[in-house]
Image (cartoon, rainbow, N blue to C red):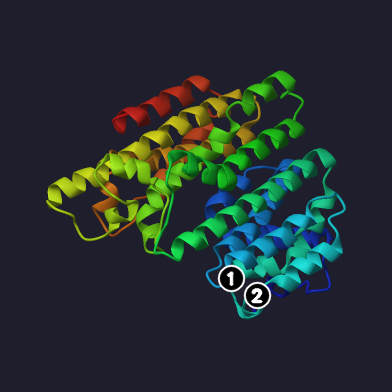
Amino acid sequence: MSNILDSIGVGENVLDGRAAWKYAEDILLKVSRTFALNINVLKGRLHKSILLAYLYLRIADTVEDDPEMTASRKNIVLGLFSAIFKTPALSDDAVAAFEKALPDSWHKSDHPYMDLCLHTHVVVPLLKKLPERYAAPVRAVTVEMCQGMAKFALRQEAALSSGWFTLERVEDLDEYCYYVAGIVGKLLTNLFAADTKLIGPARKAELQKLDVSFGLALQVANIVKDCVEDSTRRVCFVPEEICRRHGFKHSYEMFGPPMGDMEDYNKRRAAVMEELVKKAWSHLDDAIAYTKLLPNVKMRTRLFCLWPLFMAAENMKIIGDGSSIFASDQKVKITRETVKRIIKQTMMHFYSDKWIDKTYAKLKKEAGI
């Protein structure tokens, strides 16, 4: 297996200090270009804590997504990973037990996700280098996400045995999104508050009213954007109850042969997705309000939030009423030029709540919301 530690010249025997941080920063770029962008705008302990949190959640997500492991096996492996973070000690024995439980095939893989999992012993001890006010929220979110992922892995396996993984109710979608993204919003509030005295108890309480919705905004937007791609895995996160309102018996009928008149079929598919698009916009409203609660002198923290939010809003604008989702084989997504424009404009105006409101309102208007 291509070993990233070897590639940077430090080898397996160096497990802490600058070399370990170099590995963590290097592997972030390999496992997520998108999140690396806004994580790397941060500095100091806030940067390090969110970087480590992302890597730990990526490890858990890699286990949960593995197509070869049974759900019961995933439950065991996620439990072993969760056990590492249940005490501040971050036991080496617990780390070793988790790595030992990983599939043998991962040792033969060059994929960065597997490389990261097999170097849990490199990235976990780094959390001990941070003050407890940063480390405790990271441990808590990792434990909670592992529990939620194990739950949905068992549910998904049971559903896929009969054909498709689907969600029955909007509440089921909310629960899924909470475990994979909403709890990240809770983490951010705790870390932002740990990083500055400008976020006192009163402001933190206001942030906590919106932080779960901050995470859900990005997750629901991704579900809308990725729904056709997800369908190739026989997975659909669009709740069945929404689909039935528009004449579909099951959500997966939106991805099969047309049922009846093609024009009517396309209208009904678009109507289903429009409901989810409106849900994404509702969460984005909360996420923008959340970001404006952050002290406007904290440039990097605000940019960390503004970049993914405006990118999600631009994607929702392109998707519009939902019909474009099915109009092409290509995934609907914003261009690199749009990303560059978002970065440039927000760097000039991050401090201005008025500018944020005006720009966001313009996007909603262009989207027809």
Q: Nearer the viewer, residue 167 or 88?
A: 167
Question: Neighbour class for label 1 at 10 Å: few (<14), some, many (≥20)?
Answer: some
Tell me the residue that label 2 is attached to: 103
Question: Neighbour class for label 2 at 10 Å: few (<14), some, many (≥20)?
Answer: some
User: What kind of residue is marked 1?
Assistant: Met
Judge whether residue 318 can be spotted in this image.
no
Q: Secondary structure at mark 1?
A: loop
Q: Is residue 126 left or right of residue 210?
A: right
Q: Residue at x 71, y 63 (%)?
A: 23
Residue 70, percent across and down? 58, 69
The answer to whether marks 2 and 1 mark residues whose Cβ atoms lie closer than 8 Å is: yes
Q: Secondary structure at mark 2?
A: loop
Image mark for residue 69: 1
Question: To which quarter of the image does residue 200 belong?
Answer: top right
From the image, state whether disc 2 or disc 1 is nearer to you: 1
Residue 47, percent across and down? 70, 45
Vertical arrangement, residue 100 with respect to residue 367, above or below = below
Judge whether residue 134 can be spotted in this image.
yes
Image mark for residue 250: none
Q: Is residue 89 left or right of residue 6?
A: right
Vertical arrangement, residue 239 with respect to residue 22, above or below = above
Q: Nearer the viewer, residue 84 or 133?
A: 84
Question: To which quarter of the image does residue 141 belong?
Answer: top right
Q: Residue at x 71, y 59 (%)?
A: 79
Vertical arrangement, residue 363 with respect to residue 43, above or below = above
Q: Is residue 369 left or right of residue 14?
A: left
Quadrant where the N terminus sits is bottom right
User: What kind of residue is marked 2?
Assistant: Pro
